Amino acid sequence: MKTTALTTADHSAAIAYLAAARKTHSQESVAKHLKVSPRHLRRWETGELPPPAHIAAELQRLLNFGPLPGNGDFKFIDLFAGIGGIRLAFEAIGGECVFTSEWDSYAQKTYTENFQGGHSLNGDITQIHEKDIPEHDVLLGGFPCQPFSIAGVSKKNALGRAHGFADATQGTLFFDVARIIAEQKPRAFLLENVKNLQSHDKGRTFDVILKTLRDELGYQVFCKVIDGAHFVPQHRERIIIVGFRDPVIFDWDMVTLPGKGQHTLGEILHKKTGEPELEWDGSKYYDHAKHKVLDKYTLTDKLWAYLQAYKKKHQEAGNGFGFGLVTPDSVTRTLSARYYKDGSEILVSQGSKKNPRRLTPRECARLMGFPDSMRIPVSDTRAYKQFGNSVVVPVMSAVARAMQPLILESIRQEQQPIPRAA
C-alpha cells in the first residue's frame, strides 16, 4: 500500500517521538526498529522528507506503546481483549490501559507484540478475583455470548424470592463483567457483542444483561447496533452497550457515523506499485519483485470447483448459501473467524482466467480498520481467526470519542474541592 504523508499535526508528533526516542536510543537502533536506513531517518528528523503515516505508531511502540504509566487522562481495563482493537480506540483518546485479560495464547502473542510495557497480560478472567483488579475509570470488553440459565430466575420470581445478578448470570462470562463492575464501580463501560445477542433465547438473554446493568448495578445503559460499513468496506453489524455510573446526557447522535458505501475493497487491497508496503511483513503476503499477492492465497482448482458446485446446489434448492465473489469496487460480507477454512465469504476476483483468492492477513487487518503499524506475528490460520473475532477499530473510535467528554467531566467533578461551610 502506498504510504501517505502525515498531516502537519501528525508530522510534529512524529518528530517529537523521534526526539524522545533519540534520548534513550541511538540513531542506528531507531532506524533498525523502523526498518529504514540511518540516512533516511536523518531526512525525517531534518524535515527534508515527511515520514509515512505509520511511523508515529511505530515510535510509540518503541517508547512503550500508549501513554506512559500515570500519564493518561483516564484509566481503563481491557477484558476479553483479543488483539486489542478496543484498546487502540481508547488509547487514541488519551486513556491508559492498566489491566488486560485474554485467555487465548495466540491472541496474547499478537497483543503483546503490539502493546509492549506498562503491565503484564493476564489470562482467564474467571480465575482473577475482582478485588485484585486495579482501580479504573472505564471497563472495556467484547465478552463472548453464552447461554444464560433463565429457568432458575423464573422459578425464583414465581416463588417471590429475591435474587441478584449472580443468580441470573453465574456460569456465563458476562457474570465476570458484572462482578467487576459491582466491586470496582467504574465511571463508564463499553461492551461489544454480536447483533444476535438481542434475539438470543427469544430476547431473554439480553433482558437479563440489561436488568443486571441497570437495575442491579445502577448504570445508565445505552445500546445500538452499528455496521462497520460506515468506516470500512465490510458489512459487520455489532451491538455496542455503553453505560455510565453517574447521570449523563448521552445520545447516539453524538457518535459520528459517515454514510455507508464510501469505502470500497480497493482501499485495503495490496497495490501493484512495486513499492514495499510494510517492510516488517517482508514477503509474507506479497511478492514485491513480481508485483502480486503470493500464489498460496489463490484457491486451488479443487477447492474452487467445490465452492462453485456447493453454491449451485443451494441455489437450485432456493437457498442463498455460497461464496461471496468481490472486486475492488465491492463492500464485503462479514469476515468470520472461520475464514481460514476456505475464505468463501470474501473471495477476491482475479479475472475470468484465474481462480479467485483469499484476502491476505494484512488485508484482513485493514478490513477491520487496524493501522498498518499492527504487527502480525502468528500464522495465517491464527491471524484469520483473530481478525475474524475482532472489532472494527474505527467503530470503537467513534464511540470512544463520544464517551470521552463525559468520562473526563466525571473525573473533573470528583476532583473539584468541596466548598467550606461559611
Image (tube, helix red, strand yellow):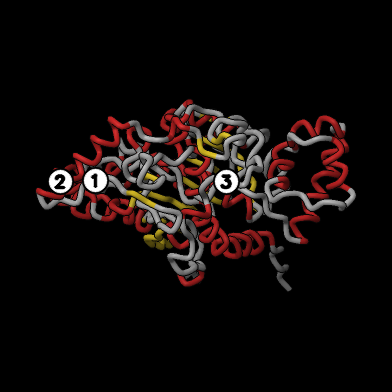
> Residue 415: x percent and y percent?
68, 59
Q: CA distance from mark 1 to mark 2?
A: 7 Å
Question: Secondary structure beneath disc 2?
Answer: helix
> Who is closer to the viewer here, 93 or 246?
93
Q: Callout 1, which amino acid?
A: Gly
Q: Is residue 15 left or right of residue 335?
A: right
Which residue is under mark 2?
314
Outermost front residue:
353
Disc 3 or disc 2, which is closer to the eye? 3
Q: Is residue 218 visible?
A: no
> Who is closer to the viewer here, 334 or 219?
334
Q: Is residue 292 left or right of residue 388?
A: right
How many labels, in total?
Answer: 3
Residue count near mark 2 (Cα–Cα under 10 Å), binned few <14, some 14–19, many ≥20: few
Q: Callout 2, which amino acid?
A: His
Q: Is residue 384 visible?
A: yes
> Residue 385: x percent and y percent?
41, 35
Q: CA distance from mark 3 to mark 2?
A: 36 Å
Q: Name the mark on residue 322.
A: 1
> Who is closer to the viewer here, 315 or 385?
315
Q: Residue at 22% across / 55% down in the picture? A: 203
Which residue is under mark 3?
272
Question: Secondary structure beneath disc 1?
Answer: loop
Between disc 3 and disc 1, whose residue precedes? Answer: 3
Q: Are marks 3 and 2 in contact (CB under 8 Å)?
A: no
> Residue 54: x percent and y percent?
68, 47
Residue count near mark 3 (Cα–Cα under 10 Å), binned few <14, some 14–19, many ≥20: some
Q: Are marks 1 and 2 in contact (CB under 8 Å)?
A: yes
> Residue 222: x percent and y percent?
41, 63
